[in-house]
Structures are given as C-alpha cells and as structure tokens.
C-alpha cells in the first residue's frame, strides 16, 4: 500500500531543504506550495509568527476534509516538526548499497529527525487520495523550532488547529512504539559576581567568582538525582588572565523530572545552593529560571491510547508505551489541551553525523499511520 520508492524520494528531497531551527522558511514554502497545488486549505499560523519572532516562518497547517463514512468524524492531527539541529545545512543524502538505509555524506546530520515524519504525512495523504479511502478530517501540522524548546507546538493557534487527538511522528523504533510521557524541563542560567583584584598583590581583597561557583557545585545534587530526576551543568565560563581574581562567572544548567513536584524541589535546591555559596563569600548571584517543557503521562484509559492499542492488536504489533526524559512536540500539544502520542518515524542516531533512516522501519511506521486514520471504528 505504501509506495516505498516515492516516500524515500520525497524524504531525500526534504532533507536537502535547509531548515535549521529558526530558519524553516524553505520547508514551509515547499509544504505550502505542495498542498495548495493539491487543492487543500493551507495556513501559516500567525500566532506562532508573533510569539517566535526570531523565526523566519510560522507553523504550517493543512486542512484535509473527511471522506466517506468518516466525513463528520472529529478531526485527527498528524504532526511533525520542520526544523533540524546543526550541522543541518547542505545535506547530501544517499541510499546505502544494501538498500537498508538513507545516510548523509558524514559532514552533516541527515535530518530524519524530523523530515522522516514529514515524509510519512505526505505519503499517507498520497495513499488516501489514490485509493479513495474513507478517513476523518485531517489537520496536518508542521511546527517550527522543536529542537530549541518546542516553540512551535507551545505557541500554536488553537483556533486554527481544532482537533483534540494528535499523532506526532518523531520517535525512534518500529511500529507499536509510542511515547506517552515526558518530563518537566527547566533551564537555569545566571552569573556569579565577585570582586576583581590583583591575584598576586592583593588576592585577599578580591572575591573569586569561580571559587564561589565551585563551592556551589561541590554541594549540589547533580546528574541522576533520583529515578525521576536529573540535573546537569552544561557550561561554566570564567575567562580572565591568571593575575586577576575573576569577577564574573556565568553558567548554564538544566533540571528534568518526570514528577513536577520533584522538578520544583530540585530547582529550589539548585538556586538555594548557589545563593548560599554567594552569600558565604560576599558575592552576588543573578539567576534566571525558565520552564520549556511540562511533564505529562497519558493514562491508558484515554481514547487515543486505546485506539492505538487496538490498531496494534489488529495488526499483530507489540504495543510499547514509553515514558522518556527527552522533549517532543507532544509536550506542547498536551499543554494546549490536545491528547497526543509520539510514534516512531524510522530514524536512528538523531543529532549525530551518523544519523540514518532505516528504510524498512520508515515504511512500516508509515503504514501504521495509514491504519490509524482509516480504521477509526474497526
């Protein structure tokens, strides 16, 4: 049913369109033109444009009317993000000699995260149109800036996207795998301000900001805090000549937890520890805490999970509901009141130069999406 050659050709075309986060305009323009030429209503989400002004495109929404027995069914959202990580410009894809994978030339990522999801959606629409299958109204949602904070999904125009059930095509693994839970995520950035002084002539008159930061780090609970919670310091910058007691040290860190209360407690621990160290040395702490992901864990009783499990049973797939500590657009959609699960797209080694598309998994994962939108009451 799925046309493998056509789907792979489309995937390879998509990954050659540069779309590093905040520069998704090329892919957005391609999608607007492609679906407009098919006669569908296509919109650029102006709410996302206003709320993510640094981006050169907004989310793209395509409205496909329902047909046949499902013409009046509630809309289903199929979603994938348009952006990629660096280095993601100038991708040169090729199929390996054994025909099992699509890879880049090794100088860039491939972009299967998440051009594979976009290609899945395009192929499903093509099959629906070719075979005149009955299906509910579909809202195709292509978001911006997923890789840098789920910005497109958090800032969707909820008047433009009316469906309350969404399949996000962005995960790893094969058919039957669904991401059903994710973490709170906090970004913590700031700086320690001490007092500069000559390190040889008057070190006692200075306050070393890096010493204050080191003291705080030594007292923090870091890395795996408990079964649900992690904390990592990614960047500490203190750049002074060795003859100067360093006045300013900047830092960037994160806190993740599957349990909101634990995340809040860990953030408080981090901030309190930094403040205590600053106070003990007579330094000043400037700090900002931002939340870019909101924890969710979908209950098995929800219709979207029951429908997915039923599809798996019909087609002899083993259901695997996963709770992960990484972020997907599911976080943004659930934040906006949309029940969503993340399904496998077929990529492997995301964000790495060795990233690749597993062709057989990509085709099988695309087939399961087709089943999900054509077997509504089966």
Image (cartoon, helix red, strand yellow):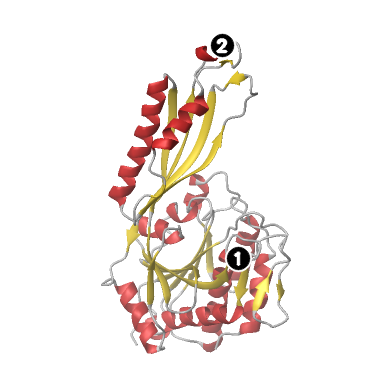
Residue carrying label 1: 31
Q: Quadrant of the N terminus?
A: bottom right
Direction front: furthest residue = 200
Is 293 drawn above or below residue 204 in the view shown?
A: below
Q: Quadrant of the C terminus?
A: bottom left
Residue at x-position 33% and y-position 74%:
305
> Crowding near pointer 1: few (<14 within 10 Å), some, many (20+)?
many
- Eye-nearest disc, 1 or 2: 2
Using the image as rendered, state which of residue 320 and residue 146 is in the foreground.
320
Using the image as rendered, state which of residue 376 and residue 307 is in the foreground.
307
Residue at x-position 43% and y-position 75%:
177
Using the image as rendered, state which of residue 243 and residue 364 is in the foreground.
243
**Residue 135 seen in the figure:** no
Whether the residues at callouts 1 and 2 have beta carbons within 8 Å, the answer is: no
Coordinates of residue 104 in the picture (x, y in percent): 70, 67
Coordinates of residue 146 in the picture (x, y in percent): 51, 56
Residue at x-position 35% and y-position 80%:
309
Is residue 130 found left or right of 268 in the rendered image? right
Q: Quadrant of residue 136?
A: bottom left
> Crowding near pointer 2: few (<14 within 10 Å), some, many (20+)?
few
Helix, strand or loop status at disc 2: loop
Is 181 drawn above or below residue 240 in the view shown?
A: below
Is residue 188 found left or right of 17 in the rendered image? left
**Residue 296 seen in the figure:** yes
- Mark pair 1, 2: CA separation: 64 Å
Residue at x-position 63% and y-position 55%:
25
Residue carrying label 2: 202
Coordinates of residue 112 in the picture (x, y in percent): 60, 67
Coordinates of residue 192 in the picture (x, y in percent): 48, 27
């Amino acid at each position: 049913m799925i046309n493998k050659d056509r789907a792979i050709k489309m995937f390879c075309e998509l990954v050659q369109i540069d779309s590093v986060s905040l520069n998704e305009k090329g892919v957005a323009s391609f999608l607007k033109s492609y679906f407009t030429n098919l006669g569908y209503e296509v919109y650029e989400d102006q709410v996302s444009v206003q709320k993510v002004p640094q981006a050169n495109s907004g989310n793209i929404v395509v409205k496909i009317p329902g047909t046949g027995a499902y013409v009046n069914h509630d809309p289903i959202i199929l979603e994938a993000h348009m952006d990629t990580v660096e280095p993601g410009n100038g991708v040169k894809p090729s199929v390996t000699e054994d025909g099992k994978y699509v890879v880049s030339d090794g100088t860039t990522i491939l972009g299967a995260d998440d051009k594979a999801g976009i290609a899945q959606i395009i192929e499903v629409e093509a099959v629906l149109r070719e075979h005149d299958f009955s299906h509910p109204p579909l809202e195709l949602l292509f978001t911006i800036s997923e890789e840098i904070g789920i910005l497109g999904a958090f800032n969707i125009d909820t008047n433009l996207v009316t469906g309350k059930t969404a399949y996000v095509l962005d995960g790893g693994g094969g058919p039957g795998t669904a991401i059903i839970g994710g973490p709170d995520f906090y970004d913590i950035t700031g700086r320690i301000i001490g007092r500069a002084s000559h390190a040889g002539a008057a070190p006692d008159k200075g306050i070393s900001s890096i010493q204050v930061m080191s003291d705080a780090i030594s007292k923090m609970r870091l890395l795996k805090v408990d079964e649900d919670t992690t904390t990592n310091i990614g960047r500490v910058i203190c750049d002074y000549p060795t003859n100067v007691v360093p006045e300013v040290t900047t830092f960037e860190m994160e806190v993740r937890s599957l349990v909101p209360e634990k995340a809040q407690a860990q953030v408080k621990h981090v901030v309190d520890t930094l403040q205590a160290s600053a106070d003990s040395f007579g330094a000043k702490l400037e700090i900002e805490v931002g939340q870019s992901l909101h924890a969710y864990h979908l209950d098995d009783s929800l219709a979207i999970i029951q429908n997915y499990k039923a599809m798996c049973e019909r087609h002899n797939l083993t259901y695997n509901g996963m709770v992960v500590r990484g972020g997907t657009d599911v976080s943004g959609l659930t934040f906006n009141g949309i029940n969503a699960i993340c399904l496998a797209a077929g990529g492997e080694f995301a964000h790495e130069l060795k990233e690749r598309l597993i062709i057989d998994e990509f085709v099988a994962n695309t087939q399961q999406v087709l089943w999900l939108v054509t077997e509504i009451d089966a």
